[in-house]
Structures are given as structure tokens and as C-alpha cells.
Image (spheres, grey):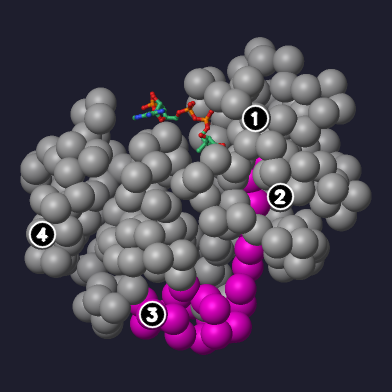
Amino acid sequence: MREMAAQARTEGSPLRLAVLDGSWAPAIAALQNAAIGDRMYPVNGGQIAEMLGPRGLTVGALASDRLVGFFSLLFPGRQPESMGLPFGLVEEELDAVVHWTAVIVDPAFRGQRLQQRLVAAVDWRLFPQSPHDYGFVTVRADNPPSLRSMLACGFAMVWAAPKFDGHLRHTLFRITPGDGEIPDGGEMVALMDLRRQLELMARGWIGWPQGAAAGHVRFAPPVPGCLVDRIRARTRSG
Ligand SMILES: CC(C)(COP(=O)(O)OP(=O)(O)OC[C@H]1O[C@@H](n2cnc3c(N)ncnc32)[C@H](O)[C@@H]1OP(=O)(O)O)[C@@H](O)C(=O)NCCC(=O)NCCS
């Protein structure tokens, strides 16, 4: 287990953040069994191994040495399951795709934005040489804490559709500083007003992480030429 340089970001809490290795697989499975709830699609043993292996990255929150939260990324590369493919990404762009795969916080430790802190702790490790990466995540439309956390982590809502688990899920795309200008204005939409969100996304608007009021998301059209605009011009099937 490698201690994280980002440990200072735990902001005085007794929790310790660390990158987890394969020996943590049983603890991850146990936390999932105890705390997954009904809004996340479970990860199986093979996926847990991937999350802890060379194609993944998992950061855990430890209280003493007990796992009380984790957050995992997968790097699909040019594999067919890349969420970059339906967005029209190609070749070396696919090498910079990251899937936000799983996140669970022990109920006793919820309410202190631990998901955001876990994400922030790994942020600096992602493609440090590139001006932007292509971070994707899907979140069930009826999972407000995870949607709020993802927006707070810089993800924008770009599309919503029924996904592999039969539930309507938002696809969110991570906005990074190299991606271009953030538009002003637009329309504040309630976090759970999916009907209005779908109308606006069908017009090409996206729900920006910046400027959201409590319980709301700010929808606005992307500035022409910015990364999201360029990607969405390729395809809307994502
Ligand atoms: C999703 C999860 C990891 C978030 O845990 P957490 O980091 O402790 O989240 P918090 O309780 O601090 O809440 C995060 C945000 O959601 C908001 N929130 C929490 N519950 C909410 C609710 N029922 N309705 C609306 N907003 C809610 C919080 O106010 C906070 O927003 P803010 O930062 O703007 O104040 C945790 O709920 C969990 O483990 N759920 C089960 C597994 C799961 O669903 N994972 C997500 C799969 S995509």
C-alpha cells in the first residue's frame, strides 16, 4: 500500500487516504456487501482485481487500518468497452480515457464529502503530461449524493439514457482546464428534474459543474470550439 502525497488533503480528519494494492480485494468486497445500497451496479471479483491492478487505480479511506471508503478508476485503453468510443474518440485520445468505476463510503462516514475527497486525492495522478484527459462516469439519475459529488469533482452532465443495468443513468464527462472556455448564464435546473435536463441535453446543452446553486445544475450550451463541443459534434450517441 502506497501512502499518498495527497494525505494532507484529508483536512484534519483522522482518516488516511492510500492507494490500495491487490491485498485489499477482500476488504473492498466486504464493504460493497455491507454498504452498496440500491443505486450502484455491483462490481464482481474480476472487476475488483482490475480496479486494483495495472489497468486500474483505487484509493481507499482508512480509519485506523479499516477500509471505510474507496473510489476506483479503470483505464480501458483501446478496448471495445471504452466509453470514449460512442463519443467518437479515436486512437491516442482513447489512451487518455478514464472510467470512474466504483465508489462506496461506509454509511457511518457519509455526510463529510468523502467521495469528493477520494476523487481529489487521485486527480493529480491522471495523465500529468496532457492538457486534458477524457474522464467518463455513469451515475443513476436517482442517486443525488453521487451526482452532487461528481459535479463537485468537475464532471458535466452530457447525456442520459437507460444503461446496462436497465436504469436511467447520466453520462458525465470530466471538464479539465485544457478543455476550453466555460460559458456563462444558461438555466438552473433542479438536480432531479430529469425531464427538463433531457430536453436541454437533446439541444446540445450540458449541465456544467461550475455555477450550480444548491440542489440545482446550471445548463448552458458549450462555447463553440471547446472540447465538449468538438466531441459532441462527432456523435450524440454517447
Ligand atoms: C455516493 C456516496 C459514495 C456518497 O458518499 P459521501 O461522499 O459521504 O456523500 P455525502 O453524504 O457527503 O453527500 C455528497 C453530496 O450529496 C448531497 N446529498 C447527500 N444525500 C442527498 C440526498 N438524499 N438528496 C440530495 N443531495 C444529497 C450532500 O449534501 C452533498 O452535497 P454538497 O456537497 O453540495 O453539500 C455514498 O452515498 C455511497 O456509498 N452510496 C452507496 C454506493 C453508491 O451509490 N455509489 C455511487 C455509484 S455511482
Q: Secondary structure at mark 3?
A: loop
Q: Secondary structure at mark 1?
A: loop
Q: Name the residue located 45 percent from the left edge and 75 percent from the top edge.
A: 84
Q: Name the residue located 65 percent from the left edge and 30 percent from the top edge.
A: 106
Q: How many marks?
A: 4
**Quadrant of res 215:** top left
Q: Which residues are magenta?
A: 70-93
Label 3, residues with CA under 10 Å away: few <14, some 14-19, many ≥20: some
The residue wearing badge 4 is 199
Q: Nearer the viewer, residue 45 or 58?
A: 45
User: Which numbered tag is attached to residue 86?
Assistant: 3
| Amino acid tagged 4 | Glu
Between marks 4 and 2, how big is the CA–CA gap? 35 Å
Q: Is residue 128 above or below residue 210?
A: below
**Callout 1: CB less than 8 Å from ligand 1:** yes
Between marks 3 and 2, how big is the CA–CA gap? 25 Å
Q: Secondary structure at mark 4?
A: helix
| Amino acid tagged 1 | Asp
Q: Secondary structure at mark 2?
A: strand
Between marks 1 and 4, how big is the CA–CA gap? 35 Å
The residue wearing badge 1 is 106
| Amino acid tagged 2 | Thr
Of mark 4 and mark 2, the one earlier in the sequence is 2
